[in-house]
Amino acid sequence: QVQLVESGGGLVQAGGALRLSCAASGDTDCISAMGWYRQAPQKAREWVAGIPTLGRTNYADSVRGRFTISRDNAKNIVYLSMNDLKREDTAVYYCHARCRGYDYWGQGTQVTVSS
């Protein structure tokens, strides 16, 4: 079992920045990849960025160049640094981890970008 807890969401003006954190606990040694998803009102959840335990980071086209995903393996924390935020980035952001073929999710953190 893996537990994920996000933090760092909030209200920010367009063009601003936020950094989300996701702390993993439990059976963290089994995690093969972590990432971030988001869900805007009346929209499906969409993938934002991923960082495997081994390999390169990858990003959705909509955030590439503005968002950066990073991981502190010693602390079992994954970060999402978001710059040049746009109104369309408004969503609940969810941390995701994959472990032995199972998907684990955090409770979500709200990001609201105002104009």
Image (cartoon, rainbow, N blue to C red):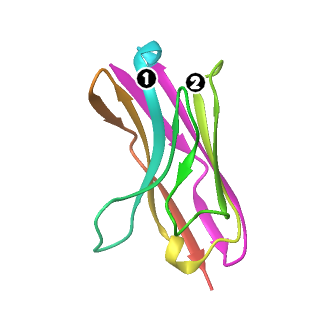
Q: Is residue 102 above or below residue 105?
A: above
Residue sitting at x 43%, y 23%: 31
Q: Furthest-front residue in view?
A: 55
Above-or-below relation of 103 to 109:
above
Q: Which residue is drawn at 60% across and 77% down?
A: 86
Q: What residue type is labelled 1?
A: Ile
Q: Do the residues labelled 1 and 2 touch (CB within 8 Å)?
A: yes
SS class of the residue under badge 2?
Answer: loop
How crowded pointer 2 is (Cα within 10 Å; few <14, some 14-19, many 20+) is rated as some
| Image: 13 above or below 29 | below
Marks counted in the figure total 2
Which three-letter amino acid code belongs to the residue tagged 2? Answer: Asn
Secondary element at tag 1: strand
Horizontal arrangement in the rendering, residue 3 relative to residue 79 (left or right): left
10 Å neighbourhood of mark 1: few (<14), some, or many (≥20)? many
28 magenta-colored? no
